[in-house]
Amino acid sequence: MLKLTDISAGYGAFQALWGINLEVKTGEAVAVVGPNGAGKTTLLRVISGQIAPISGQIIFEERNLKDLAPHQFVEEGIAHCPENRRLFPKLTVEENLKMGAFIPSARNDYANRLIWVYQLFPQMLERRHQLAGTLSGGEQQMVAIGRALMSKPKLLLLDEPSAGLAPVIVMHVFDLVRRIREEGFTVLIVEQNIQQVLELVDRAYLLEVGTVKLDGTAEELKNNEFLRQAYMGL
Ligand SMILES: Nc1ncnc2c1ncn2[C@@H]1O[C@H](COP(=O)(O)OP(=O)(O)O)[C@@H](O)[C@H]1O
Ligand SMILES: [Mg+2]
């Protein structure tokens, strides 16, 4: 579904990603793990078209996404649930969800998609008129994921959905992601909770200072001595 070849990217003169090769197949859940500053968020920004790569190729569903504008990436079927959720705190849950349906195809189908997201997350229906800023962290994450789903993406990008949440809420967020997978979505998830995310995904990539240090199936990475010692404290 998605194939990155030799992607380099950065901010002005600062280069954050160096020759990244990464693939996500239809129906897969894939994790990108790694320490702070490794370039995980930058990678998702490249995949959702917010940053143009310096070099390399992004092929999505057999199409080269080079030179498309960010909103066109959404139209192609890529939705990005950003780091720190980025909700509009003074808008209601429902107004936030509506923001996710801004592309024409989603706008025309808005009512149905809203019903569908509420079926997926019934808690959001109860809170639909509540201001997003007054929700708990876990609920806010649910709205952020729901908002991304309003565009009915083929590929959902999740940037550290569990960050800043209490351990019990982290479990709920991972359950949500599991349900989204069961709905048939293809997911690329960035996480620092390595052990937990490896229970959820098929494959994973370890990013260190802008390069892929390791990649393999979740099973392989769970048993990788380097990863266990350096990142899982095992
Ligand atoms: N908007 C930005 N402008 C300049 N440098 C940035 C910006 N965002 C991130 N960086 C730098 O790019 C590198 C990778 O950051 P990031 O992709 O956010 O890493 P991660 O998500 O893995 O923590 C870091 O060195 C960070 O300081
Ligand atoms: Mg990040």
Image (spheres, rainbow, N blue to C red):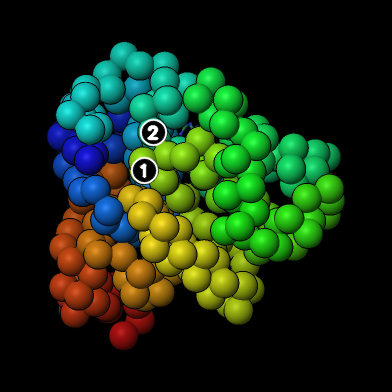
Residue 128 against residue 100 in the figure, above or below: below
Query: Farthest bottom residue?
Result: 234
Q: In the image, what residue occupies the spot 35% across and 81% down?
A: 233
Q: Quadrant of the N terminus?
A: top left
Position of 115 with respect to 184 (left or right) is right
Image spot of residue 33 (x, y percent): 34, 59
Q: Would you call the spot at circle 2 few (<14 residues within 10 Å), some (14-19), or many (20 or more)?
A: some
Query: Looking at the image, in which quadrant does ligand 1 appear?
Result: top left
Three-letter amino acid code of the residue under disc 1: Leu
Res 62 quadrant in image: top left
Q: Closer to the camera, 115 or 75?
A: 115
Q: In the image, what residue occupies the spot 48% across and 68% down?
A: 174
Give the mark nearest the N terminus, 2 or 1: 2
Image spot of residue 163 (x, y percent): 55, 61
Image spot of residue 58 (x, y percent): 23, 29
Image spot of residue 227 (x, y percent): 25, 72
Res 153 quadrant in image: top left
Residue 191 against residue 95 in the figure, above or below: below
Q: Are marks 2 and 1 in contact (CB under 8 Å)?
A: yes
Residue 31 against residue 173 in the figure, above or below: above
Three-letter amino acid code of the residue under disc 2: Gly
Label 2 residue near ligand 2, CB within 8 Å: no
Q: Quadrant of the C terminus?
A: bottom left
Q: In the image, what residue occupies the spot 58% across and 41% down?
A: 113
The residue that disc 1 covers is: 155
Element carrying mark 1 = strand
Q: Would you call the spot at circle 1 few (<14 residues within 10 Å), some (14-19), or many (20 or more)?
A: many
On residue 77, the disc is 2
Rounded to the nearest whole Å, what is the CA distance between mark 2 and mark 1?
Answer: 6 Å
